Image (tube, rainbow, N blue to C red):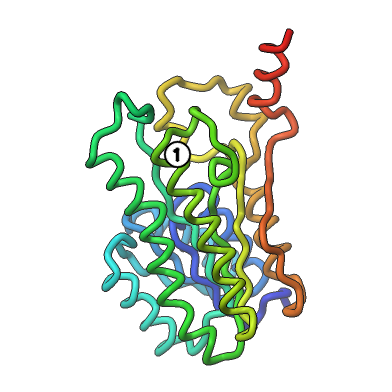
Amino acid sequence: MGKLAGQTAWVTGAGSGIGEAAAIALAAEGATVVLTGRTREKLDKVAATIQAAGGTVHVKVADLAEPAAVQKVADFIQKELGRLDILVNNAGVNIQQRSWKDLKPEGVQELVNGNLFSAFYCAMSALPIMRAQGGGLMIHTASMAGRFVSPLSGAGYTASKHAVVAMSHSLNMEECGNGIRSTALCPGEVRTPILDKRPNKLSEKELAEMVQPEDCGALVIFLATMPAHVCINEVLITPTRNRSYLASQQRKL
């Protein structure tokens, strides 16, 4: 029996990357997993992988920038599954037009909707379920860009992810008395499809040296299996060969 048997986990942005890896890892530990994202084909593929390994999974397609759609998924979880122990608030986006000179209002709106509003809506819909059952864990995929300002990720992405980190800490401040724990997960470079939005293509060697989605999945399991009296407020995970550090060394030379 897995460490999370009897628990329910809701993973957003579950069709690829960190979300996919987290969902597969949670199911492998016995959790019933609800997959949410915008593309059914991707979610169905992840669900098939989980089912092939003997896991229990539900697919719920939703645009997380729409609060009514988010609430509909939460209502399904409450009514059909009866509890929500873990929310992996992972959905996120970036755009290629990242500098102030290239930014357009629609790009900023896409970033705020996809990174911040979606995270807020999911947390807000999960809270009543977790309060009623006396506790729960939220893990929000932020970014190193949510902790440190750099031109690499772009102004809009950096600002929205900083807001996600602040959101997570504010949840701990207000909800700790209800047994609810919140973790801001701040990865550095992870080999996920969001890298396709980078203006400059990366080599296979560079991609292989990054944190892999499965590494983040293992970290999610670590967080999810900590005792209920422990809250890990924030985690930074980066590649050992940190390209930003190496670039900084080169500039000094």
Mark 1: give few (<14), some (14-19) or many (20+) Cα within 10 Å: some
Q: Is residue 61 above or below residue 240?
A: below
Which residue sits furthest top?
Answer: 253
Q: Is residue 133 above or below residue 221?
A: below
Quadrant where the C terminus lies? top right
Side of 83 where 234 appears, left or right: right
Q: Which residue is mark 1?
A: 194
Residue 198 location, quadrant: top left
Label 1's element?
Answer: helix
Residue at the (54%, 51%) spot, across then down:
142
Residue at the (43%, 41%) spot, across then down:
157
Residue 73 location, quadrant: bottom left
| Nearer to me, 22 or 188 | 188
Q: Position of residue 66 (x, y in %)?
A: 27, 65
Q: Position of residue 41 (x, y in %)?
A: 34, 54
Residue 137 location, quadrant: bottom right
Residue at the (67%, 29%) spot, across then down:
209
| Nearer to me, 51 or 136 | 136
